Image (cartoon, grey):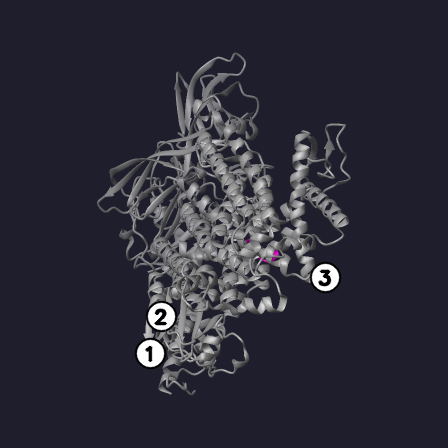
Amino acid sequence: MKEVKCDCGHVNPFGTKICEKCGMLLGNDKENKLIDMRYEGSARRSQTYQKTFIDKIWNFFSSVKVGVTLIVLALVASAIGTILPQEMYIPSTATPAEHYELEYGWVGKLYYELGFHNLYSSWWYLIIIGMLGISLLIASIDRFFPLYRSLKNQGVTRQDGFMKRQRIYGVTKLEDQDINLEEVKSRLKRQRYHIREENGHLLAEKGRFSRWGPYVNHIGLIIFLIGALLRSVPGMYIDKVLWLREGERKEIPGTNGEYYLQNNEFTLDVYDKGNEEDEQYSAAIDKTGTIVKTYQSDVTLYQRKGETIPGEKVDLEKLKDFKIKVNEPLKQDHYALYQVDYKLDELSTMAFNLMNKKTEEKFGSLKVDLNDPQKKYDLGKGYSVDLISYFPDFEFDEKGEPRTISKIPNNPAFIFKMHTPDKPEGEVSFVAIKKNVEPLGENTYKMAFNGVETQDVTALTVRKDLTLWILFSGGIIFMVGVVQGSYWNHRRIWIKRKDDEILIAGHTNKNWHGIKRDIKQALESTSLCEPTDQLEEEKSSTKGEALNG
Amino acid sequence: MNKKKRRLISRTIILLLLGAALVFALYTNFTKDKNESLRKGSDAPNFVLTDMEGKAHKLSDYKGKGVFLNFWGTYCKPCEYEMPYMQNQYKNFKDQGVEILAVNVGESNYAVNNFITKHDLTFPVMIDKGREVENAYRVDILPVTFLVDKEGKVIDIITGALTEESIQKHMERIKP
Amino acid sequence: MAEVSSNFLYAAFLLYLVATFLFGGAIKDKRGAEEKKQNKWAKLGIFTTILGFAAQIGYFITRWIAAGHAPVSNLFEFTTFFGMMLVGAFILIYFLYKTPALGLFALPIALLIIAYASMFPTEIAPLIPALQSDWLHIHVTTAAAGQSILAISFIAAIIYLVKFVDQTQSSKRTFWLEFIMFTLVSAIAFVIITSTFSAMDYKANFDWVDKHGAEVKQEFNLPALVGPNEGKLIEPDRFEPMASMPPLINAKKLNTVIWSIGMGLVLYGLIRLIARKRVAALIKPIVKNVNLNLLDEISYRSVLIGFPIFTLGALIFAMIWAQVAWTRFWGWDPKEVWALVTWLFYAAFLHLRMSKGWQGEKSAWLAVIGFAIMIFNLIFVNLVIAGLHSYA
C-alpha cells in the first residue's frame, strides 16, 4: 500500500486519481477530455483495501451499486405488500387462510401462501431494511473522510491539465495589456465567494458545506432507524385498548395503576342538512347518505393517591375533564388516549312483567341489570322469579345447548322460574330476544318483555411511545441534510495567471446554469473571455444545433 | 502496517455492532407477542382480591407456598374444560403447599356463583372487577395460568386448556 | 360562493389553454431562439399562465370559504390542487430557466390533470372526523407541492426524450416513448368519453350477484361493454353487455378501463393514420430548438428541489398527523407505502445520478418512471386499492 507522491510534493493516499493539492492526474485516464470530479477523485477507502474477509463485507456495503439495489428491492417489496390488504386490515373476525382465498380467489391464496399478507414484518423485509441501514452508514463513513481530506488539502494553483479537463474552461491570451484581477475578485466576493490567492492565482469557492448534506441526511436516517429499533425495547412502547361504558371508571391499562379514566358520555354527531351551518354540504349528504361529524368521549381523568396494589381500594384524585375526539387525544405524561372505536346502544338493563298468558294480568315487574343480575326477584304477594341461567351473549352450541360466547350483553337470554301462589313449585321459561320457549311443558304464566335501557361504549387506544422524539430528531436532521445538499451547491472557480495567458476553469456539483451566471457576472466588461461549457461545445460540434431553447 | 491493523479492527467493530442491531431487530420482531406479556422469572405482581366467601387473598401472603394462578371466564370453553381437573388436583396438592387462586375476568357475581355451584369448586375464586390484576399480569388470551413459586417468582406462563396430567406436573413444579 | 369558485376554475382552465398556444407561438418564433432571451410570445405566454394561476388561486380561496375547510379533501379537490401546483412549479422553474418549450408541455399536462379531476364528484363534502385537523392543509399542500415539482422533472424529461430519441428507425426507445404518448392519449380519451356520457346523463343499472352471493345494484355511467356477474340490466333501452365478469372483478372499473384504452387506441390510431408517423416524431419539430443539457439540468434540479419538499409533506408531516389522528405514525396503509415507494425511487434516482453518473437519457427515463409511480399512487391506490386514504 504505497502512498502517491505528486510532482508538486503533496502526498496523496493510495488510490487517489487526482492530486488533492494541485489537480495533477495520477490515474490512467489522461485520455479523457473531461475528468470525473466525483469525490474529487479521492480514494474511497473501501476500494483500496481488499484483503481480509471483513474488508470484503465492508466493501460490499460501501458500494453504491449495492445501496441502490437495496433501495430498489425495498421499493419493490413495499409495493407488493399493497396489492392486497395486509393481515391487520382484514376483518378481525375472519381467518386469514380462508379470507384471502374467499375474497381474492387464487391470487389471494397464493398471496397468503407466500406470506405476503404479513410482508412488512417478514424476516426478509426486515433484512432488506436492515442491510439498507448498514449500507447507509458504511458508505457514508467510506466517503466522508476522503472527501473531507481532499477538500481540506486542495491547493489554489492547479495543473493546466486539471483546468483544461474541467467542464467549464476558457483561455484568454494576453497581448501586452496587463489584466487586473482585482475587479473580478471583488465581484466574486460580492457573490459570496470565498477567495484564496497564491502567487497571483485565484481559487473562488462557495457553498462547500453543501457537500456535507448527504452525510448529514444519512445520519438523520440512521437515527430514525435506531428509533424504530428501540421501539421493541420493553417500556418504550405501549399499545392498549380501553373499552369504557358510559358511567364506568377503570384503570388505564399500561399505566401500572397510576391513572384511572371515567367515561361520562359518548356522542356521535352526524352532519345534518337541516342545520344551518351544514347547509353547504347538502348535495354531498344526499349522495353519500349519513356522514359522521364527531366521535367524542367526555371523560374524567383521575390519578391514584399513594401506593396500592391491584385489587385494593384506591384513593383517586381528579385531574381533569377532557373531551377526547379523533385528532384530539388526551395527553398525560407520556401517555396519550385516542378515540378509536365505539359501540352505540349496548343493552344495560332489561325489564319484564310477570303476566298471566290468558288474562294478560300483570303480577309485578322486574328489571334485570344485564351486567349484574340477581339470583332471585321477589315481586311480593307470593309472586317471585328465580333466574336459573343467564347468557349475556347467547347462542346454541353444536349440541343444541344454550351458551354464552362472551360476557357482553349483545344478545341476552334467560331461563326464569316463575313462582306464583297457584304454581308454588314454579314454571320454567326460556326468554331471549323475540323468543319465548317453554321447555318443560305448557305454562300459565310468562315473562312479558317490558323495555330495555341502553348505554354507549367508547373504545380508546392507550399509547406511550418514547421513541417518538428520536424519530422526530432523525427526521429533522434528515431534512436539514437534504436541504443543505439540494438547495445549495458547491461552486469553485479557478483563475490561473500564466505569462501570456489566463486560464479560467469552473466546477460545481450541480446547477451549472448557476455557476455560468456567476462567472458571466464576474467577467462582465472585463477583457477576459468567458469560459465555455465544454460539454455543450462537444454536442453542438457533433450535431450542429442551436444551443438555446 | 499499524494503521492497517487499526482500520481492520475498527471495521470489525462497526460491522459487529451493525450485525448485532440487525439480529436484535429480527429477534424482537419474532418474539413480539411475548414481549407484551410478563416475563418468566420476574416477580409476580402483588395483588389483593376477595373471594366469593368474602375472604381477602393477598398474593404476598402466600410466600413460601406455590401458587397456581389461573385467569378464566365463564363464557370461555377451555377454561371450563380445565376447571374440574384443577379441582381434583387442588385436593391432592392443598396439603403439599400449593394453592389455587382462580381469578375471574370481571364478570357478574351471579355468573361466577352459578359456575362454582355447577362445578363444585372449593378453591378460592375471585372476581377482578376493576380488571386491575388482569392489567398487571397483561392477560390477553384465556385461559392463562401463571405458576408462582414459593419465592413469589413467575416460573412459567401457560395459555390454553390444561389436561389433568399437565396440571399435576405444573403443580409439582411449584411445590415448595 | 361555490358557483363563483367553479367559474374561477373554468377561467383558469381556459387561460392555461390560451397560454399553451402562446408558448407554441414562442417556440415557432425564431427571433427568440437566436437572441437567447424571451420573445414577445413567451412573455405573453407566461403572463397568461400567471393570470390562470391567479384565477385558480381564486377558485381555491372561494371554495375554501364555501366549504369551511381547505379544498384538498377528496379526489376532485386534491387532483385539481395538484394541477394548480404543477402550474405553480412550472412558473417557478420558468423564471429560473426561461424555457417556453417547458410551458408547451407542462400546461397541457396540467390541463389534462384538471380535466381528469373534474370527472370525480365535485360536490362540497364535509370532513369526516379523521380529517378535521390543520394537518390536513399542511400535509396535503406540502405533499402536492413536492409532487408537482417532481412532475416538472418528468415534463423536462419528456421533452428531452422527444428530442433525443432517433425517430428514423424503430427501437426500444421509440416504442416506450410511443407508449408514453399512448398513455397520454388514453387519458384524454377517458376525459372525453366520461364527459360525453355524463353530458348525455347516461345511466344503466344492473342487478347482480356479488362474491358473497348477495344481490346488489350497480350503476354504470358508461355503456357496459362488460357487465357484472349474473347482471340483469334494469333499463331495457340500454346497451347490453357483451360479456359478464366473474364476481371477484369489479366490472364497472374494468369497463371504464376498457373504454379508455379502446378509445385511446382509436384516437391514437387516427393520429398515426393522418400523420403517417409516430406521435413523438410528430411533435419532435416543436422541440428542435431546445437545449438537451439545459433540459437535463432542469429535470435534475426539479428533483433536487422537489425531493425535500416531498419528504417533508408526504412523509414527515404525514407521520406527525398519523400519530395524532390514527394513534401511530406509520401503519403500512397503501397510500403511505406508495409515498415511501416514491421516496425510495427518487432516492435511487439521486444516487444513480450523483454517484453513478447517470445523466441525460438514463436520467430522463428515470424521471418518467418516477412520475408514473406518483400517478399510480394518485389514481390506482385511491380507486383500486382501498385503504384509509380512500375518501373519494
Q: Is residue B167 left or right of residue C235?
A: left
Q: Is residue A463 left or right of residue A426?
A: left
Quadrant holding the C terminus of chain A? bottom right
Which circle marks residue C168 in the picture?
3
Q: Is residue A77 magenta?
A: no
Residue A249 sits above or below residue C97 on the image:
above
Residue A367, horizontal then vertical, whole percent: 41, 24
Q: Nearer the viewer, residue C281 or A527?
A: A527
Q: Residue under mark 3: which chain is it in?
A: C
Residue type at tag 3: Thr
Q: Amino acid at mark 1?
A: Asn
Callouts 3 and 1 close, C-beta under 8 Å? no
The residue pinned by badge 1 equals A199
Query: Do callouts 1 and 2 point to residues on the same chain?
Result: yes
Residue that numbered label 2 is attached to: A181
Residue A72: which disc? none
How far apart, in angstroms, are the residues tagged by discs 1 and 2?
13 Å
Q: Residue shown at 59%/61% (left/top)?
A: A546
Q: Nearer the viewer, mark 1 or mark 2?
A: 2
> Is residue A114 rendered magenta in the image?
yes
Counting residues from the start of the chain, the first of labels 1 and 2 encountered is 2
Q: Which residues are magenta?
A: A113-117
User: Camera-side residue: A318 or A330?
Assistant: A330
**Chain letter for mark 1:** A
Element under disc 1: loop
Secondary structure type for disc 2: loop
